[in-house]
């Protein structure tokens, strides 16, 4: 449930960055990341169903955990509102560096969680998430190196 919240926060961040960007290629980069975060949420939804045997309601993840501020936290533990405020007026290099740092933190968190949890299904959840975060980091690094 917490991972779902973090992924949703990152989706909101990338969606807002898409709106802030002016050129089509840069918009496309952040649109792809937004779609990836949406796919992560779907993956987590399905894994929750499989592991718990329950179908989440529209209130998910708040039926499982309580977190404030609702919907404002994202990968890396940063608040979406703070990240967006920081991003205003920044150049693409700075925004890409922040995005890479956030994805790197998520990758590290999910690797640690995989080692700490018990049970094959739980380990698979965090293995899947860490692999996807690593992919995001590689995408952002490629764009950073290509564009800057």
Image (cartoon, rainbow, N blue to C red):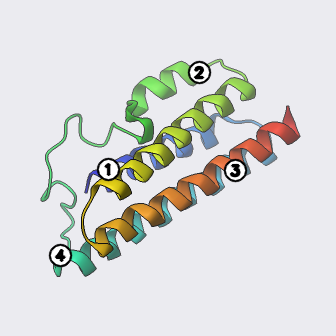
Look at 16% across and 54% down and name the residue there: 62
Disc 1 crowd rating (10 Å Cα; few below 14, some 14-19, many 20+) is many
Residue 3: give x, y in percent of width and height. Answer: 34, 53
Residue 68: give x, y in percent of width and height. Answer: 19, 35
Secondary structure found at label 2: loop
The numbered disc on residue 88 is 2
Say which label, 2 or 3, has the lower sequence index: 2
Quarter of the figure with the C terminus:
top right
Look at 17% across and 75% down and name the residue there: 52
Of tags 2 and 4, the one toward the viewer is 4
Of tags 1 and 3, the one toward the viewer is 3
Tell me the quarter of the picture where residue 72 sits. Answer: top left
- Are the residues flagged by discs 1 and 3 in contact, CB closer than 8 Å? no
Disc 3 crowd rating (10 Å Cα; few below 14, some 14-19, many 20+) is some
Report how far apart the C-alphas of labels 3 and 4 lie in the structure: 32 Å
Report how far apart the C-alphas of labels 1 and 3 lie in the structure: 23 Å
Report how far apart the C-alphas of labels 2 and 3 lie in the structure: 24 Å
Report how far apart the C-alphas of labels 1 and 2 lie in the structure: 24 Å
Of tags 1 and 4, the one toward the viewer is 4
On the image, numbered disc 4 is attached to which residue? Answer: 52
Quarter of the figure with the N terminus:
bottom left
- Are the residues flagged by discs 1 and 4 in contact, CB closer than 8 Å? no
Say which label, 2 or 4, has the lower sequence index: 4
On the image, numbered disc 3 is attached to which residue? Answer: 138
The numbered disc on residue 5 is 1
Secondary structure found at label 1: helix
Say which label, 1 or 3, has the lower sequence index: 1
Say which label, 1 or 2, has the lower sequence index: 1
Look at 43% across and 36% down and name the residue there: 76
Q: In screen coordinates, is 58 left or right of 94?
A: left
| Image: 42 above or below 113 | below
Of tags 2 and 3, the one toward the viewer is 3
């Amino acid at each position: 449930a917490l991972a779902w919240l973090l992924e949703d926060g990152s989706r909101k961040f990338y969606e807002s960055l898409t709106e802030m960007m002016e050129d089509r290629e840069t918009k496309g980069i952040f649109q792809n990341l937004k779609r990836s975060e949406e796919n992560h949420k779907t993956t987590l939804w399905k894994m929750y169903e499989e592991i718990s045997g329950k179908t989440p309601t529209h209130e998910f993840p708040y039926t499982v955990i309580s977190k404030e501020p609702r919907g404002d936290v994202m990968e890396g533990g940063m608040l979406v509102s703070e990240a967006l405020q920081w991003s205003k007026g920044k150049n693409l290099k700075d925004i890409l560096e922040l995005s890479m740092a956030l994805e790197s933190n998520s990758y590290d968190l999910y690797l640690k969680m995989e080692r700490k949890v018990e049970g094959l299904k739980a380990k698979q959840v965090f293995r899947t998430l860490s692999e996807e975060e690593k992919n995001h980091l590689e995408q952002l690094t490629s764009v950073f190196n290509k564009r800057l």
